[in-house]
């Protein structure tokens, strides 16, 4: 203990003396270079005390000016191999590079000095010799040295990507044969090493140009690989980087595999739902950002993303499939808006290919399974195919949606939502010929009438009336079928009331009748001749009678809707002209 205390006191004394020496006037660069540094290093090497040597080297680096270190770099580095084997040379070199990095960061005016003395080459050579000499140096130490050199290089030679790649290559060489690293300190150092170029260039494109970047990532364990992939994604999102070529997308998704697919089944033991959702939402945003103005290149990008995400497993697909679908449909819409004078085969070939790919992507969701989501996506694609004038494609997407509805969607609430989506989408379709439209419409009305709850049946059936009367399509104006749907809805509403009477002893709400009345008024105004004043008057009287019934269930929503409907009728009457005349004969 006494000896250790004496050594500590002596070390402090020598350190203070070195500090005083650095402050003496008259010691300029020339004197430091020729006399001071060689004499100090001679004493350091000759003392043979490992603790003293490490401390004194650190003192030299800390107390003398950065400019002096730069101009005497060769001398300073030359002393390192002469130190005792047990001296932590990596920390000495790391401190030196840290000082020089900070010096370079202060001003670009000093950079020519670095070039003049070939600082990178000297430091790179010194690190190589140290690593070679210390065969038992831990991997964490090796990575620390290369990380310090990389930081130095990014400050001094930001434009020399070959230097950056050279450092990563040297690191890969040292890691070769080591497999996945288990040492947490080493993996943290590698994350720092790989994050440095991203922070410096704020551009993922630069990292993708570094051939050794993915080779370093290969040595990360699966959990750390995921962390690093997240750093990459966040960098892209933060800087709004557009990845615009197939090759770059392939390289990026290979780097991001920790987020895109399960690398290790055991990771599910530590599965955090919130973190997972956040990560996958980030991946989804990234997929939406992929873009290229050239349709052929964009198609390649879509294929590459598809190849990667379909391996993602059931938890990821509901996050990653929708953004790829919508990004693909963006391309389809873009092609629709291009020059209409282009040859037909030229403009339709790419959309056809895209729709084939989209069909395959949505099919991948069947492994999850998420039938409601898949049905929505099929309908989105059907509408896009409709706008691209591709009838067989649109029909196929509708067929797939119907199959999902029949075979996979059993929950009554999900069925109601699905039917409304089907009806709404089918109403907007103009591409179908009579036969295909009749088939799809017949199916939709059939599904509507088979819903579990009577009110749901009623709403779906009166919504189907819109499938037989579309304003801007003369071929879809069938008043008879409109009336049939509305009459069927009335029968269902009546059955719902009778059921309420039988089970609750009250007539139930008249809300359904008022909603049907609004449909009658809508189609009457549109000019559907089969909807007569008499039928509207009859329905109004039925509603009034029911509202005055003694065993009527109180329903503020029904009261409000009826009052609003009656105000609308009066408003139309007050307009005068043809519209006023049309409504004048309705007694409200």
Image (tube, grey):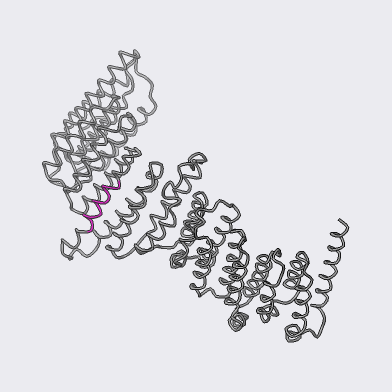
Tell which of 376 and 247 is nearer to you. Answer: 247
Residue 484 as seen in the image, left or right of residue 361? left
> x%, y% of residue 117?
61, 82
Q: Quadrant of the N terminus?
A: bottom right
Q: Above or below — where is 360 with respect to 453?
A: below
Tell which of 480 and 451 is nearer to you. Answer: 451
**The magenta stretch spans residue 359:** yes
Q: Above or below — where is 241 with respect to 466?
A: below
Q: Quadrant of residue 84?
A: bottom right
> x%, y% of residue 5?
86, 59
> x%, y% of residue 22?
79, 77
The magenta stretch spans which residues? Answer: 350-361
> x%, y% of residue 387?
22, 52
Residue 40 as seen in the image, left or right of residue 347? right
Tell which of 131 and 384 is nearer to you. Answer: 131
Quick check: can you spot residue 100? yes
Q: Residue furthest left?
A: 435
Q: Quadrant of residue 518?
A: top left
Query: For the point 50% across and 67% down, which residue is it?
Result: 169
Q: Quadrant of residue 193?
A: bottom right
Number of numbered tags placed on the structure image: 0
**The magenta stretch spans residue 321:** no
Quick check: can you spot residue 566? no
Residue 449 as seen in the image, left or right of residue 239? left
Majority secondary structure of magenta residues: helix
């Amino acid at each position: 203990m006494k000896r250790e205390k004496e050594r500590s006191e002596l070390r402090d004394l020598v350190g203070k003396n070195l500090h005083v020496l650095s402050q003496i006037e008259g010691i300029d660069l020339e004197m430091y270079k020729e006399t001071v540094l060689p004499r100090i290093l001679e004493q350091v090497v000759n003392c043979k005390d490992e603790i003293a040597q490490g401390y004194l080297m650190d003192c030299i680096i800390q107390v003398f000016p950065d400019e002096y270190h730069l101009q005497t770099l060769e001398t300073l580095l030359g002393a390192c191999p002469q130190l005792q084997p047990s001296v932590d040379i990596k920390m000495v070199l790391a401190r030196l590079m840290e000082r020089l990095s900070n010096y370079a960061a202060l001003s670009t005016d000093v950079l020519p000095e670095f070039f003049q003395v070939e600082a990178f080459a000297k430091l790179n050579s010194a690190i190589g010799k140290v690593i070679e000499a210390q065969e038992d140096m831990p991997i964490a130490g090796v990575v620390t040295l290369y990380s310090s050199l990389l930081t130095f290089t990014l400050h001094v030679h930001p434009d020399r990507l070959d230097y950056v790649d050279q450092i990563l290559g040297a690191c890969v060489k040292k890691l070769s044969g080591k497999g996945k690293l288990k040492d947490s300190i080493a993996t943290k150092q590698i994350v720092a090493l790989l994050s440095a170029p991203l922070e410096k260039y704020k551009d993922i494109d630069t990292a993708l140009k570094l051939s050794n970047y993915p080779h370093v990532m290969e040595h990360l364990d699966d959990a750390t690989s995921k962390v690093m992939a997240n750093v990459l994604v966040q960098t892209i999102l933060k800087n709004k980087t557009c990845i615009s070529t197939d090759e770059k997308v392939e390289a990026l998704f290979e780097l991001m595999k920790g987020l895109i697919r399960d690398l290790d089944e055991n990771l599910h033991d530590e599965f955090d739902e919130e973190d997972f959702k956040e990560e996958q939402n980030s991946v989804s945003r990234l997929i939406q950002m992929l873009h290229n103005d050239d349709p052929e290149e964009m198609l390649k990008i879509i294929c590459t993303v598809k190849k990667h995400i379909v391996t993602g497993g059931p938890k990821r697909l509901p996050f990653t499939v929708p953004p790829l679908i919508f990004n693909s449909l963006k391309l389809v819409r873009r092609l629709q808006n291009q020059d209409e004078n282009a040859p037909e085969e030229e403009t339709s070939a790419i959309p056809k290919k895209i729709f084939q790919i989209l069909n395959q992507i949505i099919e991948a969701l069947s492994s999850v399974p998420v039938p409601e989501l898949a049905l929505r996506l099929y309908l989105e694609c059907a509408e896009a195919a409709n706008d691209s004038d591709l009838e067989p494609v649109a029909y196929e997407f509708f067929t797939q949606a119907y199959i999902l509805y029949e075979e996979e969607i059993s929950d009554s609430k999900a069925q109601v939502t699905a039917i409304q989506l089907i009806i709404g989408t089918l109403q907007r379709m103009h591409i179908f010929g009579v036969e295909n439209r009749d088939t799809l419409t017949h199916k939709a009305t059939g599904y509507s009438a088979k819903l579990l709850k009577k009110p749901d049946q009623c709403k779906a059936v009166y919504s189907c009336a819109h499938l037989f009367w579309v304003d801007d399509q003369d071929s879809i104006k069938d008043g008879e079928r409109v009336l049939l749907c509305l009459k069927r809805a009335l029968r269902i509403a009546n059955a719902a009331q009778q059921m309420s009477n039988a089970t609750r002893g009250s007539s139930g709400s008249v809300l359904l009748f008022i909603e049907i009345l609004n449909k009658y008024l809508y189609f009457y105004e549109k000019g559907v001749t089969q909807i007569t004043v008499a039928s509207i008057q009859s329905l109004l009287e039925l509603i009034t009678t029911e509202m005055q019934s003694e065993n009527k269930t109180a329903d503020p929503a029904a009261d409000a809707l009826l009052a609003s409907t009656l105000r609308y009728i009066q408003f139309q009457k007050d307009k005068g002209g043809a519209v006023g005349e049309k409504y004048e004969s309705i007694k409200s």
